Image (cartoon, rainbow, N blue to C red):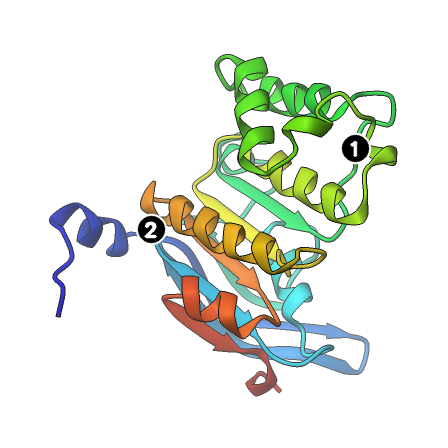
Amino acid sequence: MPRSSPRASARRDTHVLSVRDAERRFGDLLVFTAVDVDVAAGTCCAVTGSNGAGKSTLLRCLVGADRLDRGTVTIDGSAADESSPAQRAAVASVLGDVATFAHLTAHEHLQLVALAHGMPDPAGVASRTLCDVGLADASDQLPVTLSSGQRHRLALASAFVRPRRLLVLDEPEHHLDPAGRAWLAGRIADEKARGCAVVLASHDPDLVAAVADDTVDADSWR
């Protein structure tokens, strides 16, 4: 059995995200209850399960786009707080469609996101990320002119141009062909290698098998 390096082991011993006894209801509808999740630095947790099982709702609660009715979410040991500048700088997410600036090109959009998050050389970061996600040839296009697959890659790029300790992705394989999904698996592996904790909800068993260190079955939550 291959042995982890001390550096990798140290990453895995550090919980970037901890969820305890999480519950969410919409009126009388119980979405999930008694959910516990830990995600260490340099690891990926995949949330799987059927449509409507609450995967997306949990991810929204992790990043502050929704709230729990009971339980806690902590990031790097502190209670999740979307008003905290430190946590806003630590968490990047792609949950469904990502808003873009209608009159900015793909490159200008990414450059602005990188600049807003204090990245050095935002223009260079934007250029390199566009190449990484396969959009170098579309860098001067407006988002509205991109195909659905290209817009999804741009949404992913919006997360990759900013600093992050925790990356939260909701069905990141959406709109990607087999080659694109293979690229995505490699990109998530790169995120783990640099010490980022990753949480993703996915219906793609091949992607889950390729990148997940742990899985959580949303169908068991109720």
Are the residues tagged 2 and 1 within 8 Å (C-beta)? no
According to the picture, the residue beneath numbered tag 2 turns out to be 42
Secondary element at image label 2: loop
Locate residue 127: give its quadrant: top right
As shown in the figure, which amino acid type bears the numbered disc 2?
Answer: Gly
Q: Quadrant of residue 47?
A: bottom right
Image height check: is 12 above or below 82?
below
> Is 217 placed above or below 64 here?
below
On the image, the x and y values in percent for residue 160 come to: 54, 36
Q: Which residue is mark 1?
A: 100
Q: Residues within 10 Å of mark 1 (few under 14, many from 20)?
A: some
Residue 192, above or below 111? below
Q: Name the residue nearer the viewer: 105 or 35.
A: 105
Q: Residue at x 48, y 75 (%)?
A: 216
Q: Earlier in the sequence, mark 2 or mark 1?
A: 2
What amino acid type should be assigned to the residue bearing mark 1? Thr
